[in-house]
Image: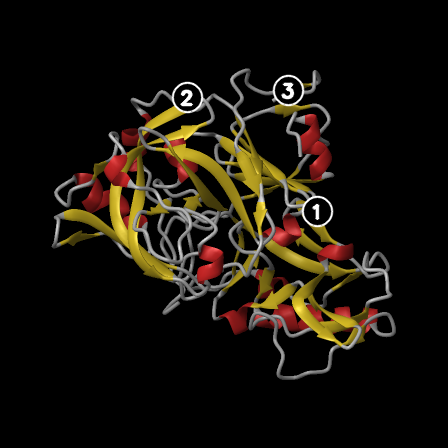
Amino acid sequence: MSSFRFLLHFTFFLFLFHQNSSFPSKQTLLLPLKKTLGHPPLAFPRNSKLSSSSSVAATTNKLAFHHNVTLTVSLSVGLPPQNVTMVLDTGSELSWLHCNKTPNLNSIFNPQISKSYKPLPCASPVCRTLTRDLPVPASCDPNNKLCHVAVSYADASSIEGNLAYENFVIGSSNRPGFLFGCMNSGFSSNSDEDSKTTGLMGMNRGSLSFVSQMGFPKFSYCISGLDSSGVLLLGDARLSWLKELNYTPLIQLSDPLPYFDRVAYTIQLEGIKVGNKMLGLPRSAFLPDHTGAGQTMVDSGTQFTFLMGPVYTALRSEFLQQTRGVLRVYEDPNFVFQGTMDLCYRVSGSSPTSFSNLPRVSLMFQGAEMSVSGQRLLYRVPGMNKGSDSVYCFTFGNSDLLGIEAFVIGHHHQQNVWMEFDLVKSRVGFAEIRCDLASQRLGIGL
């Protein structure tokens, strides 16, 4: 990306999107999730039968959620409905679909065959005002006088097209008049990965996001650590088998700062512990500075977790110290996995790979804690072997090498954690759980 830009929060026009909707915000929707294979984009923008002990709305619907490096949801769009697969991204606002067929795309949305497709003209007040939250405000397409949008991401990928209204079908429920980007051109840093999905579902707190337009008070997801499955729950539910969540408040700023994303799910990282030892860093190392640089964002669209340089260096040093004699460092100064992860190890093919003997890394937030242990600490580099050894890398990366001024909690470290995003009470909740078992309790066959 050319710069790491952030969105500004603006909610005045939210009522326009759901005042006439047949999709009530009190409804609860249950969607299976899936991980897709491949090298992920860094997706944050630049600058069912239910357990009798659970309470979920009777009109619960099911769709597909899969995961591996990107979380994807399957739904239908248009009239007649067209099946699409969208990357679930809590770090983005605008939802969009590929609308132009190219050789590298396996799935697109074709607006020409949809009777409910309605492009947004430049003259619309929505084009001039609502889109000012986007990293690049909308412009007018001179060729057709339609509202034009362009979005860039942290891996240098970019996409552009026109805004339009369309029917989004979630299970058996229809949401007419959903505003999304119908994209017709762009650049992908990984076309193979891009070809596996139809678009992106923006889930942050901005007024154009999927969850805001749908009017849901909260949503939750749970990503399995055993396979490529998970569950996404849109709305509220009372699950007696889910242990009490630990909540940390969302950080909100009233004044815009150049490097602070006010519509991201920003929480306050207060410290990091390796085993039982706290890193010897001042609290100020985790706080945003006067420009907003250094916020901590929870981002389902990014695979791994990235830490600001000084914090990453301290964590790397302590993890190395505590694993000396347990793990064999891969000594190649020229190898940095994905350009940001420079601590890697050689692991014998005959060695067990549960990594249960490694010290856990605990991320300490205000009122909550997220622990990373076992296989979530190390990631096997696909296709890379040294003799009979495999290469594994530490799953924390350096934000400085990525070129961003933020802490980012990726979805790899959210595996087997029930993640709740409460927009009404402005908080994020965590609870460790076997997500494959949670899906089974919710009646989703995996």
Question: Which residue bears the numbered disc 1?
Answer: 225
Question: Which residue bears the numbered disc 2?
Answer: 24
- Is residue 88 in view from this perspective? yes
Q: Is residue 366 left or right of residue 191?
A: right
Please name whichever residue, 72 or 177, is drawn nearer the observer in this view of the structure.
72
Which of pointers 1 and 2 indicates the residue nearer the eye? 1
Could you tell me which residue is drawn at 26 percent across and 35 percent down?
113
Q: Quadrant of residue 172?
A: top left
Please name whichever residue, 115 or 206, is drawn nearer the observer in this view of the structure.
115
Q: Residues within 10 Å of mark 1 (few under 14, many from 20)?
A: many
Which of pointers 3 and 2 indicates the residue nearer the eye? 3
- Is residue 203 in view from this perspective? no
**At numbered mark 1, what does the secondary structure look like: helix, strand or loop?**
loop
Q: Residues within 10 Å of mark 3 (few under 14, many from 20)?
A: few
Q: In the displayed structure, would residue 418 be above or below residue 98?
A: above
Q: Is residue 254 left or right of residue 280?
A: left
